[in-house]
């Protein structure tokens, strides 16, 4: 996996608690066998019925990735393999390497991207530039097999190699996403897919990154505000080369990009590679992979001021080298109704295989509590993907490693 600056004051006081696990129930729901998938990079998506949908970046019948579903079955869960990707061959232009979660359309159809595969739009990549796909049940019985459709094949100018970022729908049903590479300047793109009345989709690049000053190599996806503006991060580029936070606004003359923050490789962190989220007040929250000087990851927010300027604040700094290993974060945080944040560190912790954490805000301070420390064994290890939170406060996620023969797991963490 590829993981590639206004210093501003810290808005809130910080409290760090040594990682002793809180009273939680951790359960492995599935251990991947490779035949049904392996090495999941993304987390899972929860539908309205509480079913879990996810992807594995490898494994399956051709070894290039799968899409799966997990449904409650009595007091447990059942695993269903929905699709195995074929990759590019002389007979097929299918995708390979699904690094992102699937999203669910209003019609119940699943949409996602693969990092490679396909064979379209002048792609010069040896293993293809990736595809955007949809999946729907072949008939009324959703467990009898799903039909995959290649919605779009990425190329060089259209952007290539979509990475870990989630797709997002707007209210009109248009899809938005990012590619790590390609575009007019070969620094990555933001694209829009619009459904055609007669069927099919039309893709247009709404922004091509230039490296400096606007950023390069977006690995995450996008988040929409109530007015239709898009927000995201780049893992590189910007004024100092450590990544940016940007905003895209649709105007009569096209989409206009504004850089909201340039990361400086200091207390603000560096290399943001995960999706941001909004709270109910319209503040943005996100994390960086690491901090400056090889510190651990940082948690930040952006608050829109009355003058229209977004203020960047570092809220929390995860442990660095003084704790066995630095705590690096590849996944976004999720917020519960009380304003607590949950996420994963893919490294660090008591066993150096990562952890699930909770950040609680009280009287202007954030307190870190470890909910589970991964051992790299049967319970999994190296959680790259985002957590998902259901209406009962249960957390669901995946690990890239551990489990059966190191193929990764799907897990549940209950209060």
Image (cartoon, grey):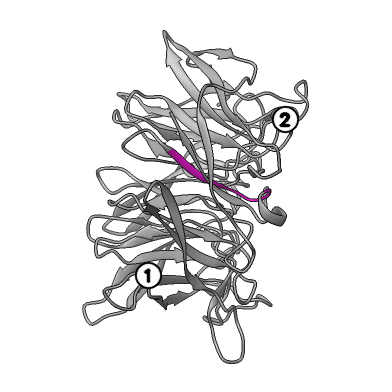
Query: Which residue: 77% across, 20% down?
Result: 322
Residue 342 in picture, x, y percent from top left: 48, 31
Q: Is residue 113 above or below residue 390?
A: below
Position of the C terminus, as image quadrant, is top left
Q: Report the span colored magenta.
A: 395-402
Residue 272 in picture, x, y percent from top left: 58, 41
Residue 352 in picture, x, y percent from top left: 73, 34
Left or right of residue 15, residue 222 in this image? left
Query: Which residue: 73% across, 32% down?
Result: 351
Q: Is residue 323 above or below residue 402?
A: above
**What residue is shown with label 2?**
326
**What residue is shown with label 1?**
143
Check disc 2: other Cα within 10 Å, few if <14, some if 14-19, many if 20+: many
Q: Judge whether residue 1 can be spotted in this image.
A: no
Disc 2 secondary structure class: loop
Residue 354 sits in which quadrant? top right
Residue 373 in picture, x, y percent from top left: 64, 31
Left or right of residue 305, residue 241 in this image? right
Give the label on residue 62, or none.
Answer: none
């Amino acid at each position: 996996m590829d993981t590639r600056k206004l210093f501003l004051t810290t808005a809130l006081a910080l409290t760090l608690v040594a990682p002793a696990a809180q009273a939680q129930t951790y359960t492995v729901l599935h251990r991947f066998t490779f035949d049904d998938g392996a090495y999941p990079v993304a987390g899972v998506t929860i539908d309205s019925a509480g079913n879990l949908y996810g992807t594995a970046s490898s494994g399956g019948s051709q070894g290039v990735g799968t899409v799966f579903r997990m449904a409650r079955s009595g007091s447990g869960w059942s695993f269903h393999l929905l699709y195995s990707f074929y990759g590019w061959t002389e007979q097929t232009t299918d995708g390979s390497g699904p690094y992102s979660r699937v999203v669910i359309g209003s019609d119940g159809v699943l949409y996602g991207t693969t990092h490679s595969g396909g064979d379209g739009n002048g792609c010069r990549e040896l293993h293809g530039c990736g595809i955007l796909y949809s999946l729907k049940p072949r008939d009324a019985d959703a467990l009898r097999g799903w039909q995959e459709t290649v919605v779009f094949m990425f190329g060089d100018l259209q952007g290539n190699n979509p990475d870990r970022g989630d797709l997002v729908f707007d209210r009109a049903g248009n899809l938005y996403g990012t590619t790590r590479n390609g575009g007019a300047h070969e620094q990555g793109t933001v694209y829009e897919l619009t459904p055609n009345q007669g069927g099919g989709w039309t893709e247009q690049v709404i922004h091509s990154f230039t490296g400096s000053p606007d950023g390069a190599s977006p690995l995450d996806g996008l988040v929409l505000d109530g007015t239709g503006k898009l927000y995201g991060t780049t893992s590189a580029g910007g004024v100092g080369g450590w990544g940016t936070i940007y905003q895209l606004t649709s105007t009569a003359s096209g989409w206009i990009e504004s850089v909201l923050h340039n990361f400086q490789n200091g207390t603000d962190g560096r290399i943001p590679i995960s999706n941001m989220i909004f709270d109910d007040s319209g503040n943005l929250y996100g994390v960086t992979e690491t901090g400056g000087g090889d510190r651990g990851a940082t948690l930040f927010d952006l608050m829109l001021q009355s003058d229209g300027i977004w203020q960047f604040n570092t809220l929390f700094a995860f442990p660095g080298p003084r704790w066995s290993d630095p705590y690096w974060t590849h996944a976004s945080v999720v917020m519960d109704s009380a304003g607590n944040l949950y996420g994963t560190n893919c490294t660090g912790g008591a066993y150096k295989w990562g952890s699930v954490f909770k950040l609680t805000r009280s009287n202007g301070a954030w307190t870190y509590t470890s909910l589970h420390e991964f051992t790299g064994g049967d319970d999994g290890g190296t959680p790259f993907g985002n957590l998902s939170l259901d209406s009962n406060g249960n957390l669901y996620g995946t690990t890239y490693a551990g489990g059966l023969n190191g193929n990764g797991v799907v897990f549940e963490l209950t209060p």
